[in-house]
Amino acid sequence: MRLADILKGEAVELSAQDQEIRYFLAYARVSTDDQERAGLSIPAQLREMQQHAQAKGIVLVGSYQEAESAFSDESRRPEFWRMVERAKSDPQITGILVHDHSRFYRDPYAGPQVKGELLAHGVRVYSATEPEYDPHTIAGLAIEKMTEFKNASYSIDVAFHTRKGMRENVARRDSEIGYCYKNGGAPLWGFAAYKVQRGTDRRGAPIMKTLWRKDETSVAGRQVWEWTRHVLVELRLKQKVSLDQVRDFLNDHGVPSPRKHYWATSSWRALLEPPALLQYAGYGVWNVHAKRGRHRPASEWKIVENAHPAIITLEQAEAIMAANDRQSRLGRDKSKGRMATVRTQGSRHLLTGGLLVCTRCGANLVGYRNQNRLYYVCGAKVYRKGLGCGPALQIRKEEMEAAVVEEIGLLFTSWTDTKRLMGMVNEQARALGQQQASESVEIARELVKVEEELGNIRQAIKGGLDDVEWANSELARLKARREQLLARQATVGEEPEVPRFDLTQVEECRRRFAEVFAQGTNEEKRAFARLFVQKIEVDPGTGEVLMHLFSRPPVPVSRGGHKKTPASAETGVRIGMVAGAGFEPATSGL
C-alpha cells in the first residue's frame, strides 16, 4: 500500500488473515439438564465457538466453563469471575467469546455493569451465533439493550414458573408414604434425603421425587437423629447449655458436622433458628431465604404440617425458642455497654472480614484480645478451639497493620496524580463546607420552632390550662432540647470559609501518607485498605505472610477500544514479617 493510493481512495484493505491477530477467551455455560438435551451442552458450545474463531481469525487463549444459572449469586460462578479478572489484567486479551449473549449474563443490572468494566479495560463480549454489533454506535447500543431485555425477561419468566412449581411441590403428598416432597438442597442435620420414582415424563425418563426421613446412620454409638434430639431436648431445653457448650460436646464425642468434620458455634446458631425448629417438629418450610442469605418475612414462608417425620414435638420447639430468647436477652444485657462502644467506634481491627486467610485450614483470621493486647488469629482457634487447623499463632495487630499501611502507601504514591488529587480534595472540602452550612440553617429553624412551642405552652398556662403537670414536663423537655440545639450551634459556629489546598500542600500530605491515614476513622481506613489489598495469606507453620495487592487501577482506553498501556497483573508481595517478629504462640483463652 502506498500513500498515493490512500490519497486517491484506491488503497487495498488487508484481508482477515493479514490483519492483527485477536486474542480472546471463551466462556461456555449451561444451567439445566434440559439445555444439555437441547443441544446447548458445553462441548457443543465450545465446538461452535472454535469454528467461529477460526473463521474470524481469532485465537482462543483460554476457555472457561461451568454449569450454573446466569442469575445465580456471584459466589456460585467462580469460573466466570476468574475469566473476567484475567481479561481485565492481561493486555493481550481484547475479547470474550460466548455461544450467545445469554450465556454471559442474564441479569439486566449486573450484566451491563460487568460489560462496562470490561470495556474500560479494552475487552468486548462477542457472540458466536448472533450478529456482531458495535456498542459505541446508536444502532449497536439499541441491539445490545434489546438483547439484554430479551435474555432477562426470559429468565424472569422461567424463574416465576419454577417458583410456582416449587411452591406446589412442597405441599404435594406422596400417595404411598404420606409425607410431602422436597425441592432439593441438603436436609437439616438429623434428617436424610432419599428419592423415589413416581412415573415417567413424556420422553420416558423416570420422574424422581425427594423425601426426608430420620438419619439412622450410626455415629459414636447412636443414630444421627438421636444425637440431634439429645442436643435439642436434653442439652438445650433441659440443661440450658450455651451454643459453645453444644459445639464442644459434639466435638468431644466425635460427632461430625454435616459439612466439615468439626462443629462451629455458628452452625448451631443456624440450627436453632425458627425455620429449622419448625422442620425438626415435622413441618415443611420453604421460601425462607432470599438472595445473599437474607431471610424473608415469616408471612411469605410456605409451611406444611406433617411434611416429614418429626424429631421433636411442636411444644418442645416452642420451649427451645423461649430458651433461646432468654439466653439472647441475657447476652445482650451483659454486653450492652461493650457493644455500644463497639458500635460507636467500629471494629479496631482493619484487616478482618476476609482479607486475612490462614493457608493451613482456609479459615479467615479474626480479631482477638489476649492479656490486654490485640492480635489476629485463625478463626478455627476462636470458633472451634483449633480443631481442623493446628497449633495457634497470634499476630500482633500493630505489627501487621503497620506493614500493610506501608505497602498501601507505596502503591498510593505510585498511582496518584497530584493535580487530580488536589481537585478531589478541594471538591470534598467544598462539600463538607456546604454540609456544615446547611446544618447551621437547620439548627436555627428548629430553635425557632422550639421557642414557638414554649410560648404556646406558657400562653395555655396563662389561659387556665388544667393539666399543669403535663405542661411542666413539656416545658422541661423543650428547654432541654433548646440547650442541646444551642450546644450544637456553638460547635458548628458560623458558616466557615472553605479552605483551598494547593499542589504543595497536597504533595506534602501524599508524602506523609501514614500520618494522614492514621487520622481517619476505623471504617474509613478499612474501606481505603480494601481498594489496594485483595487478600493476605498467613502460614501459621512458617510464619510467612504473602500479601496480594491490586497492582494498578483500570487502564485508559483509546477510541478504537485498544489499551494504551498494559495493565499489570495482581502481585503477591512478601512483607517482612516472620515468626518471632510480630508473631507469638497462642497462650491462653484459645
Image (cartoon, helix red, strand yellow):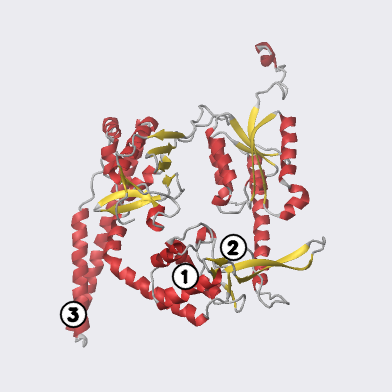
- The amino acid type of the residue labelled 3 equals Asn
Q: Position of residue 335 (x, y in %)?
A: 29, 65
Q: Secondary structure at mark 1?
A: loop
Q: Give the mark toward the camera: 3 or 1.
A: 1
Q: CA distance from mark 2 to mark 1?
A: 17 Å
- In the rendered structure, the answer to whether residue 219 lies left or right of residue 523 reads right
Q: Earlier in the sequence, mark 2 or mark 3?
A: 2
Q: Position of residue 430 (x, y in %)?
A: 31, 44
340 or 590: which is nearer to us?
590
* Residue depicted at x 27% and y 60%: 341
- The residue singled out by tag 1 in the image is 272
- The residue singled out by tag 3 in the image is 472
The quarter holding residue 443 reads bottom left
* Residue depicted at x 39% and y 57%: 385
* Residue depicted at x 73% and y 43%: 43
Please indicate, yes or no, whether residue 574 appears anywhere in the rendered image: yes
316 or 31: which is nearer to us?
316
Residues tagged 3 and 1 counted as in contact (Cβ below 8 A) = no
Q: CA distance from mark 2 to mark 3?
A: 63 Å
Task: Using a 10 Å C-alpha cutoff, classify the residue at mark 2 as few (fewer than 14 neighbours), some (14 to 19) or many (20 or more).
Answer: few
Q: Secondary structure at mark 2?
A: loop
Q: Earlier in the sequence, mark 3 or mark 1?
A: 1
- The amino acid type of the residue labelled 1 equals Leu
Which of the labelled discs sits on residue 186, or is there none? Answer: 2
- The amino acid type of the residue labelled 2 equals Ala
- Name the image quarter holding the N terminus: top right
Give the residue furthest to the front.
Answer: 221
Task: Using a 10 Å C-alpha cutoff, classify the residue at mark 1 as few (fewer than 14 neighbours), some (14 to 19) or many (20 or more).
Answer: some
Q: Earlier in the sequence, mark 2 or mark 1?
A: 2
Q: CA distance from mark 3 to mark 1?
A: 49 Å
